[in-house]
Image (spheres, rainbow, N blue to C red):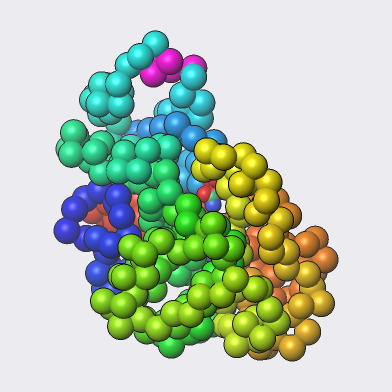
């Protein structure tokens, strides 16, 4: 990677992505390697998280480093009015790496411009979630045996969903075909469709979530309608349960189909899908540990995985 921070998946070349995935595979073989001994990382979470924070913190622990940070900014001096700039400058005094999630789009990039300490974007508003994309790519590669020429159907909140926005960019190196399934209120923004057009990527938009679409997919990427992104809660109530995947809808799906979801889920995947061999979302979250170990090594310039 050109920058030592990871603020956007767009900064990763195809070679960067393949190298990180190869290192993730090595970490899956052995996640416990004392590479970060003597190093301290900070996890600064201005928005709630279960998987991203805990898998990053597990990754640091398994690599022999130490973690400081917060999961609730209301317990920090931000609640007294301290700016993000001052918070980043303070934490930079103490640590070797900052992993941050923030509700403002561009917050991680801004932070990376303030400090020489590497910043990993753990999600910035509706913009990007690059570490999720790398674990998604790892999951796709592991389940399909390849990344190229796949049909990927994204379902749900495609307007505010930072995971789908990042995944489009991450997959753009691998000749995907996308199906975007969303209600009119949550359609994929023009910015990402324009990116597909400019990159020669085929995509189709749908408002109905049909078995016909499922049956031509290799990956079904379900997403949650995110209550926290809506300013109009009546609109949220109208669309919150618009698509629900039931096990019976998978009857004629491809053998290789795998169902991914960045999680948390609310109602969009029925619990009867969990027993399907095509359900992969729990393993996907587990892959987050291996991908994040690889990402930490990448931003810290550690090439030798002892
Ligand atoms: N996928 C994801 O970002 O999950 P969390 O919000 O639990 O971190």
Q: Is residue 78 magenta?
A: yes
Looking at the picture, how far across and down is residue 145, in whole percent?
A: 50, 84
In the image, taking residue 213 as reference, residue 57 lies left or right, namely left
Q: Is residue 220 above or below residue 78?
A: below
In the image, taking residue 252 as reference, residue 45 lies left or right, namely left
Q: Is residue 139 magenta?
A: no
Q: Which stretch is magenta?
A: 75-79
The reply to whether residue 290 is visible in this rendering is no
Quadrant where the C terminus lies?
bottom left
**3 or 123, nearer to the observer:** 123
Looking at the picture, how far across and down is residue 56, in whole percent?
A: 46, 45
Q: Quadrant of residue 115?
A: top left
- Residue at (58, 83) in percent of width and height: 217
- Residue at (73, 76) in percent of width and height: 277
In the image, taking residue 294 as reference, residue 16 lies left or right, namely left
Figure disc tally: 0
Looking at the picture, how far across and down is residue 88, in whole percent?
A: 28, 28
- Residue at (65, 81) in percent of width and height: 214
The reply to whether residue 275 is visible in this rendering is yes
The chief SS type of the magenta part is helix
């Amino acid at each position: 990677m050109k920058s030592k921070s990871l603020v956007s998946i767009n900064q990763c070349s195809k070679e960067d992505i393949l190298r990180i995935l190869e290192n993730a595979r090595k970490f899956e073989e052995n996640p416990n390697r004392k590479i970060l001994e003597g190093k301290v990382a900070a996890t600064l979470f201005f928005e709630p998280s279960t998987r991203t924070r805990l898998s990053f913190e597990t990754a640091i622990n398994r690599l022999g480093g130490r973690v400081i940070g917060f999961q609730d900014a209301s317990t920090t001096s931000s609640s007294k009015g301290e700016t993000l700039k001052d918070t980043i400058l303070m934490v930079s005094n103490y640590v070797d790496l900052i992993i941050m999630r923030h509700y403002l789009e561009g917050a991680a990039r801004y932070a990376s411009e303030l400090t020489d300490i590497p910043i990993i974007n753990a999600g910035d508003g509706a913009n990007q979630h690059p570490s999720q994309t790398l674990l998604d790519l790892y999951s796709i590669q592991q389940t399909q045996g390849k990344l190229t020429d796949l049909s990927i159907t994204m379902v749900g909140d495609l307007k505010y969903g930072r995971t789908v926005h990042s995944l489009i960019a991450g997959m753009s190196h691998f000749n995907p075909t996308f199906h975007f399934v969303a209600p009119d209120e949550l359609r994929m923004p023009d910015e990402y469709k324009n990116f597909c057009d400019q990159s020669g990527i085929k995509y189709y938009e749908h408002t109905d979530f049909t078995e016909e679409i499922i049956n031509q997919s290799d990956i079904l990427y379900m997403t949650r309608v995110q209550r926290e992104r809506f300013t109009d809660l009546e609109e949220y109530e109208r669309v919150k349960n618009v698509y629900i995947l039931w096990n019976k809808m998978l009857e004629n799906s491809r053998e290789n189909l795998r169902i991914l979801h960045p999680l948390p889920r609310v109602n969009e995947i029925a619990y009867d899908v969990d027993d399907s061999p095509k359900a992969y979302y729990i393993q996907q979250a587990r892959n987050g540990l291996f991908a994040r170990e690889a990402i930490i090594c990448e931003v810290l310039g550690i090439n030798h995985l002892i």
